[in-house]
Amino acid sequence: MDSKTSRLRALPSVDAVLKSNEAALLLERFGQKAATAAVRLMLSEARAELKAGASDPPSTAKVVERAFASLANDDRSTLRPLFNLTGTVLHTNLGRALIAEAAIEAAVAAMRDPVALEYDLSNGKRGERDDHIRALLRELTGAEDATVVNNNAAAVLLALNTLAGGREAIVSRGELIEIGGAFRMPDIMSRAGAKLVEVGTTNRTHPNDYRSAVNAATGVILKVHTSNYRIMGFTTEVAAPELAEIATEARVPLMNDLGSGSLIDLSQFGLKREPTVRDAISEGADIVTFSGDKLLGGPQAGFIVGKRELIAAINRNPMKRALRVDKIRLAAIEATLKLYRDPDRLAERLPTLRLLARPQADIAAQAKRILPAVQSAVGPGFSVQARECQSQIGSGALPLDTIASFCLAISSNSGGLALERLSTDLRRLERPVIGRLEDGALILDLRCLTDEAAFLSVLANLNLHDPA
Ligand SMILES: *Cc1c(COP(=O)(O)O)cnc(C)c1O
């Protein structure tokens, strides 16, 4: 018998591995079915290795260890929490706003038990989903009525379809935005069944451009917040109050898509003032749409507020049913909105605002405090420096206004490839760390680093790529 055959014979059987003491934990955690499949796979890999000339068959303990590692890796959620050190607070690809504790509790309670989602507890009759947020949104925005759908893209689609389906929608050429992904205003309009009527030019649109476009087929005049860009220089746009006059004269509704739409004046937190939803309503918009998970700091949602009869028409649109939100989000939305009743404690309670308002000195102190630990985790091949940087709000809010922040800037002694490898290693951590590569350095903006202890303990497990 040649030695290869004897080594193959020395491999334990699937059954023997599963019956071993070492496998108890594997079975306990992953169950019989998955454990058996993983052990079988590990043994067949070991067999292939032996056939290819490997010298020693793995021990039972080794087979179990490999099966455990493979199943544990498979078991990790791809949606597991990570550290957003990109410097973009509302990062769309990282899930935008973090939800306030009160909203998390409300959502969990709604998940666990039945709730009066569409049930009127006062009379035992059928109720409406929107009743949970209608009064709150009226109170916070000054609008007559309100409804909520899946996200702001849905809000725009539904409102346009209701107001201008089979009719014309007038928009300035300066506001025909693409938000990213497939959200382009002209495409949304055509999917909403509205005929786009562009007026003005890219940089200048005048009142008469709107006036001369209005006709019997006009369904809506649309104003869009140019969220993610700004046109500068020789520019003019028609301000909302004047546009409202034009719309009133023409007897067509004015819709204002605010995008991020804040419910409060952000200048009190050191940010630039964005028009609030209340401003847009008081400037005469008949319908205002805005997101739940941008500056508002709640779960993904799209709000539509405005004139009672228009909201009623929107609610009668069969599309509404396809775009509605579930009880979990509705509970979180209600709890988030309620926090706005106490503006003094909002920055404490709303994570988005807390992060945006975090003082630079606080972030700088943190950078200096954790620098030695980060330097020791990345090793002597890299040099880590604490320095100033700029954070962004993100999600198209105030695109040109950055917030002074502090970061750890990691540079490599051996070039850009090493930094890219380090980024990859950081993304592979149990709790991935996401920074940004900029000007030859890996920037870890610490504005959003709230759980410092967790960060340091995760970082201690950093396994660097072998230096090439
Ligand atoms: C972000 C944005 C949208 C889309 O909102 P979502 O909540 O991402 O669906 C629409 N319009 C404007 C102006 C925006 O900024």
Image (cartoon, grey):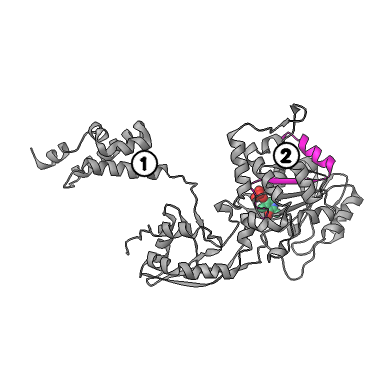
Q: Is residue 54 left or right of residue 215?
A: left
- In magenta segment, residue 62: no
Residue at image x 48%, y 48%?
A: 80
Q: Which residue is mark 1?
A: 71
Number of marks in picture: 2
Mark 1: give few (<14), some (14-19) or many (20+) Cα within 10 Å: some
Residue 309 location, x and y as percent? 84, 40
One can see residue 186 in this view = no
Q: Which residue is mark 2?
A: 132
Residue 172 or residue 326, whichever sits in front: 326
Q: CA distance from mark 2 to mark 1?
A: 43 Å
Q: Quadrant of the N terminus?
A: top left
Q: Is residue 249 left or right of residue 406?
A: right
Mark 2: give few (<14), some (14-19) or many (20+) Cα within 10 Å: some
| Vertical position of residue 369 compared to residue 21: above or below | below
Q: Which residues lie in the magenta part?
A: 295-319
Q: Is residue 22 left or right of residue 358?
A: left
| Vertical position of residue 222 compared to residue 27: above or below | below
- State whether label 2 is within 8 Å of ligand 1: no
Amino acid type of the residue that numbered disc 1 sits on in the rendered structure = Leu
